[in-house]
Amino acid sequence: MNNENLIPNSQRSPSEVRENGRKGGIKSGQVRREQKTYREMAKAMLSATITDENILNELKAYGISETDVKAYTLLGMIKASGNGSHNAFDRLMILLGEETQTTTSEQEKQANLLSAIEKAVKNGD
């Protein structure tokens, strides 16, 4: 960005400041509406029922009777954390309400939990 081209509001006319504010408000409203649409779509997609037999069989293999996309997504997070994804593990811990501060003892606990999850995933496949 070229800072030489920027003009501060203090050097603009009141009508220009007002017009820029109006444009910003309009754009902000558009973005909020788009975000709401995407949130609603995500909620609908996550609550959709899975009909793919392969996915249903995989869920059943893990003892999961839920057939919505949320259950399959959660299974994917557990598998990913078992395969060493620290991000997936952190998200699971947040979901479970566990502390995500990584002290040495916490790192050991995470390593043990990841190891246990990895074993469970390998045994289930």
Image (spheres, rainbow, N blue to C red):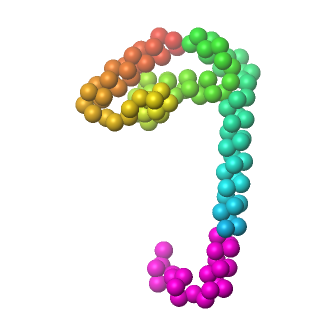
Residue 37 in sight from this viewpoint: yes
What residue sits 70% from the left and 53% below the top? 34
Would residue 102 appear left or right of 64 to someone viewing this image?
Answer: left
* Dominant SS in magenta: helix
Residue 58 in which image quadrant: top right
- Residue 30 in percent (x, y) is at 71, 60
What residue sits 47% from the left and 10% below the top? 123
Up the image or down, 28 lies above or below 117; here it is: below
Q: Nearer the viewer, residue 61 or 74?
A: 74
What residue sits 69% from the left and 49% below the top? 36
Tell which residue pokes out farthest to the left in this image.
104
Up the image or down, 27 lies above or below 42; here it is: below
- Residue 94 in percent (x, y) is at 46, 33
Please provide the residue range marked out in magenta.
1-24
Up the image or down, 14 lies above or below 30; here it is: below
Would residue 104 appear left or right of 56 to someone viewing this image?
Answer: left
- Residue 112 in percent (x, y) is at 33, 20
- Residue 27 in percent (x, y) is at 68, 65
What residue sits 72% from the left and 48% below the top? 37
Up the image or down, 103 lies above or below 39; here it is: above
